[in-house]
Amino acid sequence: MENNRFETPVTVKSSQGPDRALNTAREATDYLLNNWTGKRGPKHREALQACHDALAGTKPAMTARRAFVAAAREASVLVTDKV
């Protein structure tokens, strides 16, 4: 069951063109692993773990979204966390 969808997308800067809207914990994980341009510190690790937990179904997607937004804000890649 795919219950890793965010209620509200998170928009982040993309190094490969226009800003990117992330809708799921899977998309956030991909961004954290492959497109992250900021520091890979504790908030980055927490976001990765939260997204992994959401994908495994052990934590809600809202928790992953919150952790991702905190990491993106710290790394200055967050465009918006609202639609």
Image (cartoon, grey):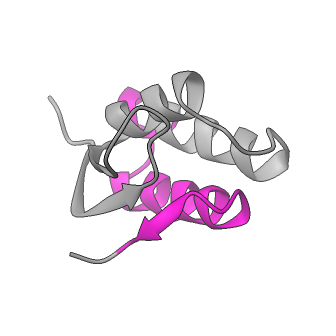
Q: What residue is shown at x 72% (from left), y 64% (from top)?
A: 74
Q: Is the stretch drawn in magenta largely helix, strand or loop?
A: helix
Whether 67 is among the magenta residues is yes
Question: Depth check: 7 or 53 in front?
Answer: 7
| Res 27 → quadrant | top left
Q: Is residue 23 visible?
A: yes
Left or right of 80, for residue 41: right
Question: Depth check: 41 or 35 in front?
Answer: 35
Whether 64 is among the magenta residues is yes
Residue 43 spot, x, y in % from top left: 75, 52
Residue 50 spot, x, y in % from top left: 55, 44
Q: Which quarter of the figure is the C terminus placed in?
A: bottom left
Q: Is residue 57 visible?
A: no
Q: Residue furthest top?
A: 34
Question: Depth check: 78 or 18 in front?
Answer: 18
Q: Residue furthest bottom?
A: 82
Q: What residue is shown at x 61% (from left), y 46% (from top)?
A: 47
| Res 57 → quadrant | top left
Question: Depth check: 13 or 28 in front?
Answer: 13
Q: Residue furthest left?
A: 1
| Res 62 → quadrant | bottom left
- The magenta span reads 53-81
